[in-house]
Amino acid sequence: MRLAVAAVVAGLFAAACGSDVASPSVLSSAGAWARTTPPGATNGVVYLQITSPTDDAIVGASVPASVAGSAELHETMGAEGGAAMPNMPNMDSGDGEMTMTPVDSVLLPAGEPVAFEPGGKHIMLVDLANPLTAGDHLALTLTLANGTTLPIDVVVADNAP
């Protein structure tokens, strides 16, 4: 709440001074979606875009136990070039040496959208309770370094809605 109030005050001050620079005044997310999973899948993935009004970092993610055992920040690492991965047309397998690596945090530069997308940063849902089915929704909460939490409604889809 303090973050949102400070951002609004800063935005009003900039407006009063005649600034025409557009910058977000609140922490926000957009386009949150999770890829559908086949029966028996134990992991899932969430993609979204997040923008912070101040320099910060995402330091954690969580979902209810009814969705998965845990949610982890990950980044896909690998060489470019090669064939697309099945059911992930935007993800390139490079030379076959692609890995998904857990990360402790994801930096959020002030005012710059940070994308979690296929082939890059993503949120891994570990030990799914049930398959993720198109049209379903799940609750995701991101935790920032400054202590702010951001609840996000995630829609499940075959590809970005």
Image (cartoon, helix red, strand yellow):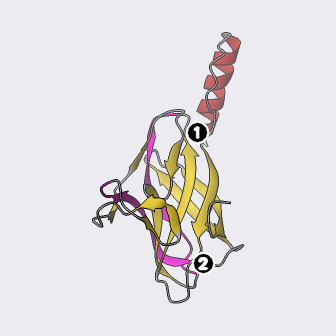
- Calculate the distance from the C-alpha at mark 2 to the C-alpha at mark 1: 35 Å
Mark sitting earlier along the chain (2/1): 1
Instruction: Please tell me which residue is depicted at 52% across the width and 57% down the height of the picture.
Output: 142
Place of residue 17 in the rendered image (x, y in percent of width and height, measured from the top left) = 66, 10
The amino acid at mark 2 is Leu
**What residue would you read off at disc 2?**
132
**What residue would you read off at disc 1?**
2
Instruction: Please tell me which residue is depicted at 55% across the width and 88% down the height of the picture.
Output: 39
From the viewer's perspective, is 42 left or right of 82? right
Residue 45 magenta = no
Q: Nearer the viewer, residue 141 or 43?
A: 43
Label 2: few (<14), some or many (≥20) within 10 Å? Answer: many
Q: Nearer the viewer, residue 161 or 82?
A: 82
Q: Is 11 located above or below residue 63 in the figure?
A: above
Q: Is 37 located above or below residue 121 in the figure?
A: below
* The magenta segment: 54-79
Q: Is 149 located above or below residue 26 in the figure?
A: below
The amino acid at mark 1 is Arg
Q: Residue furthest top?
A: 17
